[in-house]
Amino acid sequence: MSMINVHNLHKKFKDNVVLDGIDFTVDEGEVVAIIGPSGSGKSTLLRCLNLLEQPDQGEIKIGEASLGAEHYGKKEVVALRQQTAMVFQHYNLFRNKTALQNVTAALILAKNMKKSEAERLGLEFLKQVNLEDQRDQYPVTLSGGQQQRVSIARALAVNPKAILLDEPTSALDPELVDSVLRVLRNLAEKKMTMIVVTHEIEFAREVADKVVFMADGKIIEQGAPNDVLRYSKNERTRRFLQQLDKHKEVPV
């Protein structure tokens, strides 16, 4: 059963076309990895799905909520945003709140949950990302990988239909990447619907059910990981992957 449907999505900033007629679907429990060069529209696509950016044209349906980009009101915005949670590249945690308080904030403010119940649930989600022992630490005392795992716990806490992750490991030192990817692998095993913008090609190959390659605001190719990443017949896709491989070979 499809969880996310996007049809003919367009977005431009002044004269710069960033999304140019995007069509794709995500099934319930599916992990979709979006790859592509910088400036291809990957992050803008995620931000349009929860209306952090307003699309100019097209239709978005997530769960039971749907929205036409050219005519919608506050009610439709709220309904659509309630379907997803976003995990950002740079964590976006409240610096003056502990790890547990970051996770419980949305439960208390948006869901009107009692503090005691929110803390009980919040601790459960911190356990899922192996951070229960850091519950009282502030972001400044946590590593980048730990901060990103708190961000994932915060996303899980609002019980979204899908999680949108925008380059969740790109701001991390290489030795911290694995801790975040392990959490995402565990969520994939639990059939959490996820769209992950990523440059971690091996993660996409191993964990994603579908890979989408974007360039110049368009979806150039999409399909099973092996079809796109190993046996692609598209010259643009193959060239992008070859450039990534060359970059990895450059000594640091």
Image (tube, helix red, strand yellow):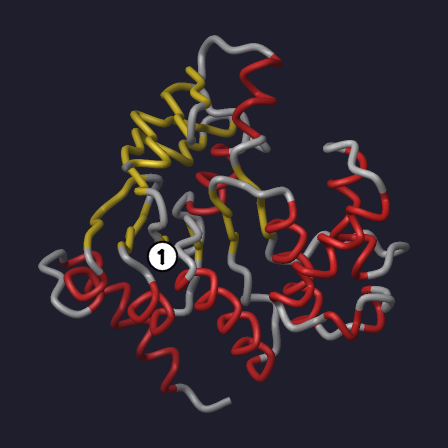
Above or below residue 146? Residue 63 is above
Q: Residue at x 25, y 72 (%)?
A: 242
The answer to whether residue 81 is left or right of residue 1 is right
Residue holding disc 1: 35
Under tag 1, what secondary structure? strand
Q: Residue at x 60, y 57 (%)?
A: 89
Question: How many numbered marks have been drawn onto this rendered protein structure?
Answer: 1
Q: Position of residue 92 (x, y in %)?
A: 72, 52
Q: Nearer the viewer, residue 242 or 133?
A: 133
Q: Position of residue 41 (x, y in %)?
A: 42, 43
The answer to whether residue 244 is left or right of residue 152 is left
Q: Quadrant of the N terminus?
A: top left
Above or below residue 131? Residue 103 is above
**Quadrant hosting residue 207:** bottom left
Q: Residue at x 57, y 10 (%)?
A: 73
Q: Position of residue 218 (x, y in %)?
A: 29, 40
Q: Nearer the viewer, residue 23 or 189?
A: 189
Above or below residue 221? Residue 237 is below
**Quadrant hosting residue 177:** bottom right
Residue most extreme to the right: 96
Q: Nearer the viewer, residue 23 or 155?
A: 155
Q: Label 1 amino acid?
A: Ile
Residue most extreme to the left: 233
- Label 1 Cα neighbours within 10 Å, binned few <14 / some 14-19 / many ≥20: many
Above or below residue 31? Residue 27 is above
The answer to whether residue 195 is left or right of residue 25 is right
Q: Position of residue 5 (x, y in %)?
A: 33, 31
Q: Residue at x 22, y 66 (%)?
A: 229
Q: Nearer the viewer, residue 134 or 8?
A: 134
